[in-house]
Amino acid sequence: MEDIISDLKTENTFAFGKLYQDNFGRVSNFVQNNSENRADAEDLFQDAMMVLVEKLRQDYFQLTASINTYVYAICKNLWFKKLRDKNYELTVDELQSFYFLGSITSSIENEKIYSEKLKGYLLKITDHCNRLIRDIFF
């Protein structure tokens, strides 16, 4: 994850491609299920990438969830902002999607808890085991 974050900070196209590959399908499905089209999903995803890079460049920014969860949350927030800006009247399906934002927040919090537990476990093992695990998984 650290590699992709450092690549994003330097605007490496591979990192953007990887994020697109991993996340665009979900974002596109969400947007298209909410009465919009693929072009709107592409615009939304591009805007989310700009927000992400801007956040990563800030010295005090600390990513507390997986990059994929964070990208999806940005997309959802941008989507709901677009709806508010259009003074859009929400249908039942869109209202249900709006409630889904709460589940994204919950997912981020659960991932924070998992991340903290993982960090605690990594501090308890030997340096050799720690390096081995980091080399294999991170």
Image: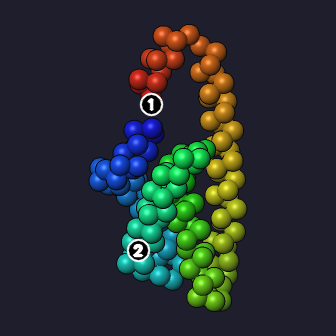
User: Seen from this angle, which residue lies furthest left?
Assistant: 13
Q: In which quarter of the image is the N terminus?
A: top left
Residue 98 seen in the figure: yes
Residue at 53 percent across and 59 percent down: it is: 72
- Residue 44 image point, x, y percent: 45, 72
Within 10 Å of disc 2 (Cα), the crowding (few <14, some 14-19, many 20+) is: few
In the rendered view, does 2 fall on the left or right side of 100?
A: left
In the rendered view, does 47 fall on the left or right side of 90?
A: left
Q: In which quarter of the image is residue 123?
A: top right
Q: What element carries label 1?
A: loop
Q: Label 1 amino acid?
A: Phe
Residue at 69 percent across and 47 percent down: it is: 109
Q: Is residue 9 above or below residue 20?
A: above
Q: Label 2 amino acid?
A: Asp
Residue at which label 1 appears: 138
Residue at which label 2 appears: 43
Residue at 64 percent across and 50 percent down: it is: 108
